[in-house]
Image (tube, coloured by chain):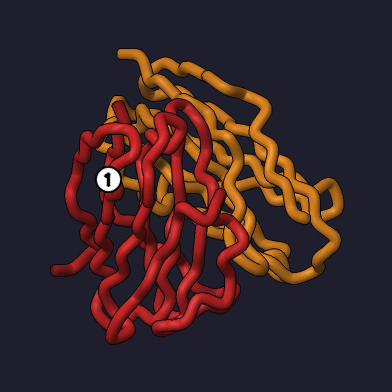
Amino acid sequence: AQTVTQSQPEMSVQEAETVTLSCTYDTSENNYYLFWYKQPPSRQMILVIRQEAYKQQNATENRFSVNFQKAAKSFSLKISDSQLGDTAMYFCAFMKHGMRFGAGTRLTVKP
Amino acid sequence: GAGVSQSPSNKVTEKGKDVELRCDPISGHTALYWYRQSLGQGLEFLIYFQGNSAPDKSGLPSDRFSAERTGGSVSTLTIQRTQQEDSAVYLCASSADRGVTDTQYFGPGTRLTVL
């Protein structure tokens, strides 16, 4: 069974600074997908970024980038130039046969 | 509509009553998922539909929970004889197909409160 671990229940960052959220997972699979989702207070789950395990290049979406370490089974999310609107719960997710989510990290961006 | 919609957005019910939660996926999406999110927790997978069939029901917590999907579109999650521990946000997601390439798009959820 796949498990996803987010070891940081809460984090905070000053506006305009950079923050990194950690995620590790456990799997025996070789091909799979990894995602970061954002859930603001509105409760809407929003896809932030995705990474295909067969790709060595780290995915990037504007201010969001990942550090994917396949051997270490690590998938961290870096948010650059943090904005107040980035305040939300962030969930790491693993997908092979169905999707499994981590417990989430609550990120607060302070003005 | 452009996104996944769910209704109602909030539901308060008394212990022992039955409830139905509805999900309208993105038009054309063949895969549909139900998740449960308890307060302050991550998402717990409940059931997955491909078309009208449910090849993966492994996450349903008890036989009080059931779901159906008709016409390859709308899905209904039914909870019978609700218990207080059923209180949670129930999220629905859809994707174009159930492959590892497919991103899931989530609805806004239904917050269920069982008194």
* Residue that protrudes farthest toward the left in the picture: B1
Residue A81 visible? The answer is no
What percent of the width, then of the height, locates residue A79?
Answer: 48, 36
Residue located at (56% from left, 49% from top):
B61
Q: Is residue B46 above or below residue A40?
A: below
**Letter of the chain in orange:** A
Residue B8 visible? The answer is yes
Instruction: Give the image quarter of residue A32.
Output: bottom right
Residue B8 is left or right of residue B112, and the answer is left
Q: Which residue is mark 1?
A: B110
What percent of the width, then of the height, locates residue B63?
Answer: 52, 56
Q: Is residue A24 above or below residue B2?
A: above
Inspect the image, locate mark 1, and give the three-letter code of the amino acid beneath it: Thr
Residue located at (30% from left, 49% from top):
B18
Q: Is residue B50 above or below residue B112?
A: below
Q: Nearer the viewer, residue A109 or B50?
A: B50
Q: Nearer the viewer, residue B61 or A63?
A: B61
Which hue belongs to chain B?
red
Residue located at (38% from left, 34% from top):
B87
On what subunit does the disc labeled 1 rest? B
Residue B13 is left or right of residue B103, and the answer is left
What percent of the width, then of the height, locates residue A4?
Answer: 68, 44
Q: Nearer the viewer, residue A92 or B77?
A: B77
